[in-house]
Image (cartoon, coloured by chain):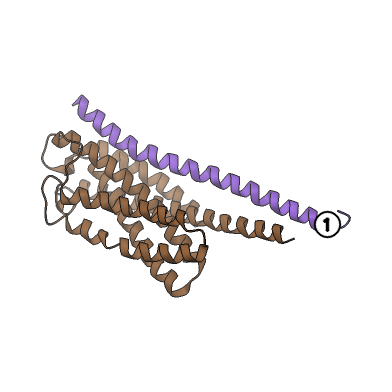
Chain colours: A purple, B brown
């Protein structure tokens, strides 16, 4: 029974760890993208401003 | 917004499904009836999502070839990514289940082999995309590849009913207790909501990537 529980735990862990890593990666990507877009927009706005 | 609602719904339903698997299903892991094993209630929804994702790749491929809008390429890529993820998960999860029930991690039977081929096809889909730099050509080739690759999905489903050896057949259609049906349906609904939430999230990110690319081009043009 103990080894069965180990297998069941492993089978569940594989799925949830896999999904969690994927979601975490997406969230990190979103953060980076938002930062880059904001920086770029800011830079372009600054570049277009008079006297610069 | 849609993604957030679905994520919240799945965050409620997924633990409910897991709890149901462990608390309500009469556990008899030595039984030849696969419905008594909690892994069954995780394996079937993951496999369902993988096949559904590849169906979306197929539909998005057709839509892209007809309309040639980047949106359908984004939908196809996002669904393919999730399809590869869930195929990986159900292959690993199934392998652990196989070791537990039959004492072996893997056998080269039609069902398992066709599932592995499905995984390889969609990994190749991303390799193909990585090797083509022109966005339009990449989207066109990927759409065609996604449509052709889908041929393996009906084969995977068919092997459930024919050419059976070790892998159980249409066991999902022979659930003998209402609680089993409820647990399976809850699992499938929870996974579907989670999949849709991730799909919308991924599509949104791809659109952001596209916007970033356009902004960079604009800056270089200045």
Image mark count: 1
Residue B160, percent from left and from top:
17, 54
In-image side of B131 versus A30 (left or right): left
Closer-to-camera residue (B26/B199)? B199
Which residue is situated farthest in the top direction here?
A: A2
In-image side of B149 versus B105 (left or right): right
Q: Would you say residue B43 is visible in this rendering?
A: yes
Q: Which residue is at 24% across, 29% downward? A: A5
Q: Residues within 10 Å of mark 1 (few under 14, many from 20)?
A: few
Which residue is situated farthest in the right direction here?
A: A51
Q: Which residue is at 25% across, 44% downward? A: B41
In-image side of A32 versus B181 (left or right): right
Which residue is situated farthest in the bottom direction here?
A: B66
Mark 1, residue position: A49
Residue A45, percent from left and from top:
77, 56
In-image side of B98 versus B201 (left or right): left
Residue A33, percent from left and from top:
60, 49
Q: Which residue is at 46% across, 44% downward? A: A23
Closer-to-camera residue (A20/B191)? A20
Q: Secondary structure at mark 1?
A: loop
Q: Given the image, what chain letter belongs to the residue carrying mark 1? A: A
Where is B191 relative to B137, above or below?
above
Q: Quadrant of the C terminus of chain B?
A: bottom right
Residue B170, percent from left and from top:
15, 53
Q: Would you say residue B27 is visible in this rendering?
A: no
Q: Quadrant of residue B146?
A: bottom left
Q: Which residue is at 25% across, 28% downward? A: A6
Q: Quadrant of residue B43?
A: top left
């Amino acid at each position: 029974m103990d080894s069965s529980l180990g297998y069941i735990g492993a089978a569940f862990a594989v799925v949830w760890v896999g999904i969690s890593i994927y979601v975490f990666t997406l969230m990190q990507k979103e953060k980076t993208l938002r930062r880059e877009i904001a920086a770029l927009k800011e830079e372009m706005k600054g570049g277009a401003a008079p006297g610069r | 917004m849609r993604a957030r609602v679905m994520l919240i719904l799945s965050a409620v339903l997924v633990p409910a499904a897991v709890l149901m698997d462990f608390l309500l299903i009469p556990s008899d892991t030595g039984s030849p009836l696969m419905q008594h094993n909690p892994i069954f209630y995780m394996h079937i929804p993951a496999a369902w999502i993988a096949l559904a994702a590849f169906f979306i790749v197929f539909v998005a491929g057709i839509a892209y070839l007809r309309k040639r809008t980047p949106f359908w390429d984004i939908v196809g890529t996002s669904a393919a990514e999730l399809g590869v993820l869930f195929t990986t998960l159900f292959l690993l999860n199934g392998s652990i289940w196989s070791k537990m029930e039959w004492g072996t991690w893997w056998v080269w039977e039609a069902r398992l082999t066709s599932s592995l081929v499905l995984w390889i096809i969609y990994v190749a889909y991303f390799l193909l995309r990585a090797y083509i730099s022109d966005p339009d050509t990449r989207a066109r080739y990927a759409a065609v590849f996604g449509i052709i690759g889908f041929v393996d999905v009906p084969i995977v489903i068919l092997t459930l009913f024919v050419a059976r050896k070790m892998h159980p057949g249409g066991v999902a259609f022979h659930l003998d207790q209402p609680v089993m049906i409820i647990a399976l349906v809850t699992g499938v609904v929870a996974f579907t909501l989670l999949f849709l939430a991730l799909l919308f999230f991924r599509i949104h990110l791809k659109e952001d990537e596209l916007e970033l690319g356009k902004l960079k081009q604009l800056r270089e043009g200045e």
